Image (cartoon, rainbow, N blue to C red):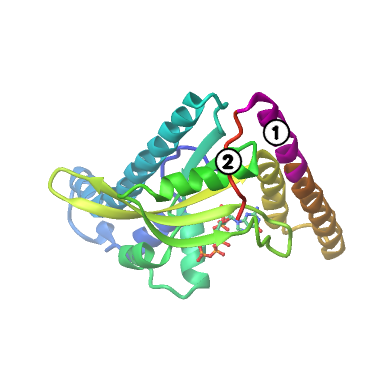
Amino acid sequence: MDYLISQPQSGSFNTEIMRQMPDFTEIDITETEFIDLLEVSMMPIQQFFTYYKCAIMEIETKFKVLNEQFSLNGESNPIEFIQSRIKSYGSILRKLHTKNIPRSLDGIESNIHDVAGIRVVCSFVQDIYRLADCFLQQDDITLLERKDYIQNPKPNGYRSLHLIVAVPIFLENEKRLVKVEVQLRTIAMDFWASLEHKLRYKKNLPAETQEMLASDLKMCADESSRWDAKMQEIRNQIQDADGVRTAYPIE
Ligand code: 0O2
């Protein structure tokens, strides 16, 4: 699923809901009544996804604020771009199936942590850790899980810092805590992950070709990791020369 602000898509999830609904053709109701019934049935699902959209807005704003604040210290903005997405119904259903989770809104809420996803892309690795620390210090953010695939890349070469957090959203009569997955990466990590993602979903390639491409991608991942380190080193030297370096150790 591409990271953009996107509406939940219709698809297999809707098909599943429709399958579980009574056969209205066998009930004596008008088309208008049918549409009304359908709207009422869909409402809890729409409401459910709206909470995630609101949580995305909250978190996106937090990163935009940090981006502005960093630039006040005479540094350039650390964030190159932010993307977000609501996980597609198909992708949610696949995860429910793989993890043997009940197909219900409760099942999704409790077990799928990346229904709402935000990707924060920076130029430099140190900015990722600095932003993550500033973000996690905010008293309305609860860290549920941290996976550091930068310090510990996946065997295929995937690198990113993942934070699963809970953020409150304030509604008319209630406050709800909503889970969001934040992925922080450099431009190089993002470039690599987009290409690798395409390979992952190419099922029609011969196994031999898949293996060869995976091995090439691993080499690119190692190379891009070296680039990130070198670019960071160069930036540190430039900042030292300008006297604006903010010492920030990478963990
Ligand atoms: P999509 O299409 O981005 O939604 P968990 O969520 O903890 O139960 P999971 O899903 O293994 O278990 O968590 P993990 O490994 O932290 O991965 C979550 C997301 O990170 C993935 O979501 C991808 O967006 C990204 N990701 C993780 N590993 C890789 C990888 O090897 N390559 C690429 N390109 N992206 C990766 P989804 O649901 O897989 O996909």
Q: Which residue lies furthest to the bottom in this view?
A: 100
Mark 2, residue position: 127
Report x, y in % for residue 112: 43, 63
* Quadrant showing the C terminus: bottom right
237 inside magenta stretch:
yes
Q: What residue type is labelled 1?
A: Arg
Report x, y in % for residue 230: 77, 41
Q: Which residue lies furthest to the left in this view?
A: 173
In which quarter of the view is residue 159 placed? Answer: bottom right
Q: Which mark is residue 235?
A: 1
Return the disc, 2 or 1, that comes first in the chain's sequence: 2
Q: Which amino acid does label 2 sit on?
A: Asp
Q: Is residue 69 left or right of residue 184?
A: left
Q: Is mark 2 within 8 Å of ligand 1?
A: no
Q: Is residue 1 visible?
A: no
Q: Residues within 10 Å of mark 2 (few under 14, many from 20)?
A: many
